Image (tube, rainbow, N blue to C red):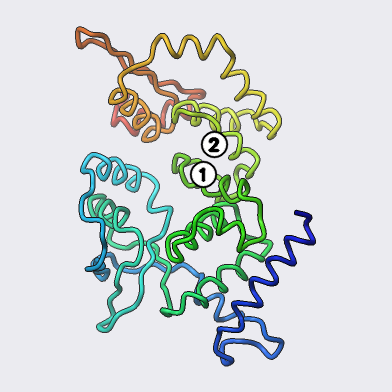
């Protein structure tokens, strides 16, 4: 599909949605009013104790270990992906999406959390506001990814349906959604413009958190371009490296510990464990500044 065709497809989608929107929410030219878009898509911070769980939430069971891991990440980086709520009487809010994140935020001890406030039950208005907001040129890749995720969560769309509504290739939507699976510190870097979408796309294809963080540190330290980052990823995944990885593969539980340590301490971590229950943990650092940061996180005092 050509660029002009995609724009036309998106235009038809917006025009069809606009037909179902009340006139007082639209401009004289027929577009959604800017203040309506802003109100429907902006993020606010609200007290966590003012948010009630949706009593109709079908998911009741949550993995305690996974919640603990997410809580640890939230303590370090804050809640990157906002909750979605709707206002209810009494100055409170009811959760629409994000119960796992809300529970983890409570475990992390947060008092306030970022939220998207659903202004109306009119799903057409929400979709239209998100579609129009995505046309802005100053959105960063994480903001785009979160908007696509909202369409999936609140409109119950598949990635293919989001792509169709946006006039995008499915692979484009998939790549944005996959950004939300990157370690939090990398997501923050994308959001702040410290690294580009191209850098992030290269990191998406790396299968281990410690390797992602190692490459991320190299991007920052050496000022790598996107092409240089892609070359580094290919170099790490040479056949000999893959073969060595297979030989030293650990049980999934220990690999998860290694990944969690790498994420928590923002550096490359090597964990070894043998059948006798012995092993070691190796932290890597790439400057005195990173060493001092690591010692601080480990609460090690050097006199």
Circle 2 residue: 204
Circle 1 residue: 178
Residue name at image x 53 percent, y 61 percent = 147
Secondary element under disc 1, as helix, strand or loop, is helix
Disc with the residue nearer the chain's start (2 vs 1): 1
Residue name at image x 47 percent, y 61 percent = 150
Secondary element under disc 2, as helix, strand or loop, is helix
Q: Quadrant of residue 87?
A: bottom left
Q: Is residue 67 above or below residue 236?
A: below
Q: Nearer the viewer, residue 2 or 292?
A: 2
Image quadrant where one finds the C terminus? top left
> Cα distance, mark 2 to mark 1?
7 Å
The image position of residue 162, as x and y in percent, is 56, 59
Q: Is residue 140 above or below residue 26?
A: above
Count of numbered circles in the view: 2
Image quadrant where one finds the N terminus? bottom right
Q: Is residue 174 above or below residue 227?
A: below
Residue name at image x 44 percent, y 27 percent = 210
Q: Quadrant of residue 225?
A: top right
The image position of residue 277, as x and y in percent, is 20, 11
Mark 2 surroundings within 10 Å by alpha-carbon count, few (fewer than 14), some (14 through 19), many (20 or more): many
Q: Are marks 2 and 1 in contact (CB under 8 Å)?
A: yes
The image position of residue 202, as x and y in percent, is 61, 34
Disc marking residue 89: none
């Amino acid at each position: 599909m050509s660029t002009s065709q995609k724009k036309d497809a998106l235009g038809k989608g917006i025009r069809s949605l606009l037909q179902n929107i009340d006139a007082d929410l639209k401009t004289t030219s027929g577009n959604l009013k800017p203040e309506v878009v802003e109100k429907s898509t902006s993020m606010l911070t609200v007290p966590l104790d003012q948010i009630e769980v949706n009593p109709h939430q079908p998911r009741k069971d949550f993995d305690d270990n996974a919640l603990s891991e997410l809580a640890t990440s939230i303590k370090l980086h804050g809640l990157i992906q906002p909750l979605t709520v709707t206002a209810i009487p009494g100055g409170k809010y009811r959760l629409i999406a994000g119960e796992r994140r809300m529970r983890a935020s409570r475990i992390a001890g947060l008092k306030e959390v970022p939220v998207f406030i659903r202004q109306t039950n009119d799903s057409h208005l929400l979709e239209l506001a998100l579609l129009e907001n995505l046309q802005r040129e100053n959105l960063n890749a994480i903001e785009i990814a979160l908007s696509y995720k909202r369409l999936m969560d609140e409109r119950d769309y598949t990635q293919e349906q989001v792509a169709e509504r946006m006039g995008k290739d499915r692979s484009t939507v998939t790549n944005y959604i996959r950004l939300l699976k990157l370690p939090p510190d990398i997501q923050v870097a994308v959001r702040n413009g410290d690294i580009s979408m191209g850098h992030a796309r290269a990191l998406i294809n790396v299968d281990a958190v410690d390797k992602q963080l190692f490459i991320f540190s190299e991007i920052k330290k050496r000022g790598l371009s996107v092409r240089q980052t892609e070359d580094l990823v290919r170099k790490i995944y040479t056949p000999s490296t893959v073969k060595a990885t297979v030989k030293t593969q650990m049980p999934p539980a220990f690999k998860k510990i290694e990944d969690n340590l790498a994420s928590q301490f923002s550096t490359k971590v090597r964990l070894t464990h043998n059948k006798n229950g012995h092993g070691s943990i190796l932290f890597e650092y790439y400057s005195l500044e990173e060493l001092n940061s690591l010692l601080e996180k480990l609460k090690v005092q050097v006199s």
